[in-house]
Image (cartoon, rainbow, N blue to C red):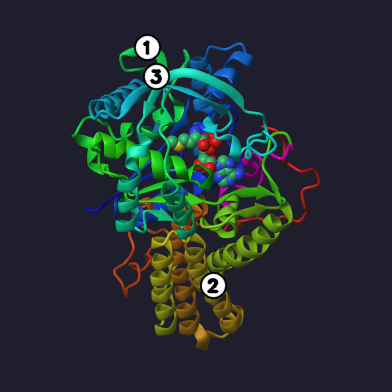
Amino acid sequence: MNKFYITTAIDYVNSAPHIGTAYEKIAADAIARYKRLAGFDTRFLMGNDEHSINVEKAAREKGMDPLAYCDQMAEVFQGVWKRLDISYDDFIRTTEPRHHRAVQELLRRIVARGDIFRGKYEGYYCVGCERFYPEKDLVDGKCPDHKTEPQWVSEENWFFKLSAYGPRLLAFYKEHPDFLIPAIRRNEIVNVIEGGLEDISVSRASTWGIPFPDDPAQRVYVWFDALINYISGVDFPSEDGRWRYWPADLHVIGKDITRFHCIIWPAMLMSAGVPLPKAVLGHGWVHFQGEKLSKSLGNIVNPLDIAEKWGSDSLRYYLLKEVPLSRDGDFTWQLFIERYNSDLANDWGNLFTRTVSMVHRYRAGLLASREAGAELKALIVAALRDYREGMDRYAIEDGIEAAWTIIRRANQMVEEGAPWKLAKDPAKAAELDALLGELVVALQHTALLLFPVMPAKARLVWETLRLTPAIEEARFPAEGSLLPPPPGDTPLGESKPLFPRIDKAPTESPARTA
Ligand code: ME8
C-alpha cells in the first residue's frame, strides 16, 4: 500500500490556538482524510514547539515551571484540535525523551560530518521569530513581523556551516521543481540561496532547551530542535517500525517559516545523510476582517467560540473554501454567515433534510430504487474525477466545488421532479421511487466527498443513509464507477437539520484576546 506522511508546523505554546493556527491544522487534516479515502497508509503528525524563549517567559510570568506550563498547554492545544475534529495519528512535544534522542543523534551526525564549529555571534535577535536579523532587514530598527525591537545578542556558541550547502540546495531545487509549493514561494527561496547563505548559530547559552552534545552549558537553538520533530515523530534514529513513513510526503507550514523548512531543514538532512522530505506546502495567512491577527489588536478569534456556537464543520468549511492554501484570506463575520446560510443551510443541509423527510413521508423510510440514472451517474463520475484532481493539487476549494456540482444538481432535480406532486398520483409511483433513489445516491456521494472537509456532518449523513462500512473506512470507487448502492431493506435514520440557519448576526464580536 502506498504511504502518505503529512505533518504540520508545531506550535509555540505561549498562547492558545487561534483561527490562523487552526486553519493550518484543518487544511492538513482535510488532506490526510482525503489520502485515507484514496487508500493511502496515512500518517499525520502534529505537535508543540516548547523550547522557545517566549514559552519559558510565559511560564515564569505565571510563576510556573516551564515543563509544567507546557504540560498544561499540551492539554489546551490537543483539546482544541480534538474539538475541531483534527485526526492526527501522533502528537509530538519537543520536551519528550524520544525527541531529545533524535535531536542529539542528528546533531551527532552533523558534528561527525564536520559541519559544526565554534564561533562568536553578534546580532539582532527577535524572540518572537526566534531568529537573528541582519540590520538591513529591520524596519525602523524593529522586527518587520512583530514590530518589536530585537535584542542585541553577543555570544560564543556553535555554528552550522549552512553556507557550504548553497550549491547542493540549488541543484536540489533544479531537480525537484515541485518541492516547495506554490511556485511563487519557491522562486523567493531560490533567490535567497542564490544571494549566498551565511552560517547560522545553532546553540544558545540557556537552561531551557535540549543540551548541546558535549556542551551542556549550551542548548540547541530552538529552530534546529523544532525541525527535527518531523523525524523524531517517526522514531528516528530507529530504522524499524514507523521509520517506514520517512521521507515525509508533505510538510504543511505557513509562508513565514518557509526559509527554515526549505533551506535550513534540507541542509541539516543533507549534512546528516538523511533523505529529504518530498514536498513543503507554504500556505498563506488568515486575516480577521482585513487585519493581521494580533494580540495587541485584540482580534484573536478563538476557533472554539465558533465551533461551540455553529459546529466545527462550519468553521472548517469556511476556512477551506475561502482561504485557498496558495493565498492569504480573510475571516469576516458577514461572509461567514453568508456562506453558512447559503451553502450549508440552504444547499447541502436542505438537500439532506428534505430528501430524508420525503423518503419517510412517502415510503416509510425505505428505498425501492437505489441507483442513479445515466445523467446523474455521469455527473457524479465527473465530480469524483474533478474532486480528486483538485485534492491531488491540494486545491481543497476545487474539491469542494466538485462536491457542490452534485448538491446543486440534486436540488434542481427536486425542483424539476416535484416529488410532492408525484406522490399524489399513484400512476407516478415508479417515477417517485426513482427520484428518491437518485437523491439518496447523490447525498451518499456528497457525504464521501465532503468528509475530509466536514467530517462530523458527513458522518451524520452517511449514518442516516445507513451506509456501511463506517465513513472512516470508506474508499473512493474505481474511476468511472459509483459507490455501492445504499441498503434497500433498512429504513433511513431520522431527518434532522444539518445546519440550522443563523437568523441573527452575532451582536457582540466573539473576537477576544486568547
Ligand atoms: O512558527 N494564518 O510556531 P507558531 C495562517 N513553532 N497561519 C498562521 C497564522 C495565520 N494568521 N498565524 C500562524 C512556529 N500561522 C514554529 C514552527 S515548525 C518546525 C516550528 C501558522 O505557533 C504559522 O505560519 O508561531 C506556522 O506554520 C503555524 O501557524 C505555527 O505558528
Q: Position of residue 186 (x, y in %)?
A: 44, 55
**Which mark is nearer the camera, 2 or 1?**
1
Q: Is residue 298 magenta?
A: yes
Helix, strand or loop status at disc 3 = loop
Few, some or many C-alpha atoms within 10 Å of disc 1 (few <14, some 14-19, many ≥20)? few
**Which mark is nearer the camera, 3 or 2?**
3
Horizontally, residue 17 falls left or right of residue 187, namely right
Horizontally, residue 158 falls left or right of residue 407, namely left
Q: Is residue 302 above or below residue 36?
A: above
Write down the region rendered in magenta. 297-313
Q: Is residue 83 above or below residue 116?
A: below
Q: Position of residue 344 (x, y in %)?
A: 61, 61
* Residue behind mark 1: 216
* Residue behind mark 3: 210
Q: Gap between marks 3 and 2, in whole Å? A: 67 Å
Q: Which residue sits at x=45%, y=74%? A: 437
Taking depth in this image into account, of 480 and 489 the one nearest to the observer is 480
Instruction: Say if residue 20 shows up in the picture.
Output: no
Q: Quadrant of residue 377?
A: bottom left
Answer with mark 3 or mark 2, whichever residue precedes in sequence: 3
Q: Which residue sits at x=68%, y=35%? A: 147
**Which mark is nearer the camera, 1 or 3?**
1
